[in-house]
Image (cartoon, rainbow, N blue to C red):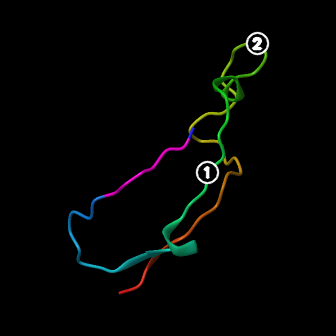
Amino acid sequence: MDVNLTANIVNNTCRLSVENGGEITLPTVTRDWFYNSDKSDRLSPTDDEAGTPFTIHVDD
């Protein structure tokens, strides 16, 4: 499934740029990826789990 995410700049007091020409590729996982075999949550909001890094620069 392809998903396009569009953000609207509400207040343009600074200039932002996103690496890779604004393209950020995030992996697709099934719902089961988020749970252990006993159906408990695999991750909690405070876990420092590696993901797909991307950078947003504040240029000005």
Q: Residue at x 20, y 68 (%)?
A: 11
Of all residues, the one furthest to the top in this rendering is 38
- The residue beneath circle 2 is 38
Q: Residue at x 64, y 61 (%)?
A: 53
Q: Which numbered tag is attached to residue 47?
A: none
Asked if disc 2 and disc 1 are in contact, CB closer than 8 Å, the reply is no
For residue 19, say whether it is visible.
no
Residue 4 located left or right of residue 41: left
Q: CA distance from mark 2 to mark 1?
A: 27 Å
Quadrant in the picture for residue 41: top right
For residue 30, say whether it is visible.
yes
Q: Residues within 10 Å of mark 2 (few under 14, many from 20)?
A: few
Q: Residue at x 56, y 60 (%)?
A: 24
The quadrant the N terminus occupies is: top right
Residue 32 located left or right of residue 9: right
Q: Amino acid at mark 1?
A: Leu
* Magenta-highlighted residues: 2-7
How many tags in the picture?
A: 2
- The residue beneath circle 1 is 26
* Residue 17 rendering spot, x and y as whole percentages: 44, 76
* Residue 3 rendering spot, x and y as whole percentages: 49, 44
Residue 47 drawn above or below residue 26: above
Q: Amino acid at mark 2?
A: Asp
* Residue 13 rendering spot, x and y as whole percentages: 23, 78
Of all residues, the one furthest to the bottom in this rendering is 60
Residue 47 located left or right of residue 4: right
As helix, strand or loop, the secondary structure at mark 2 comes to: loop
From the viewer's perspective, is the residue at label 2 or at label 1 nearer?
A: 1
Determine the main secondary structure of the stretch shown in magenta: loop
Q: Nearer the viewer, residue 53 or 5?
A: 5
As helix, strand or loop, the secondary structure at mark 1 comes to: loop
Quadrant in the picture for residue 19: bottom right
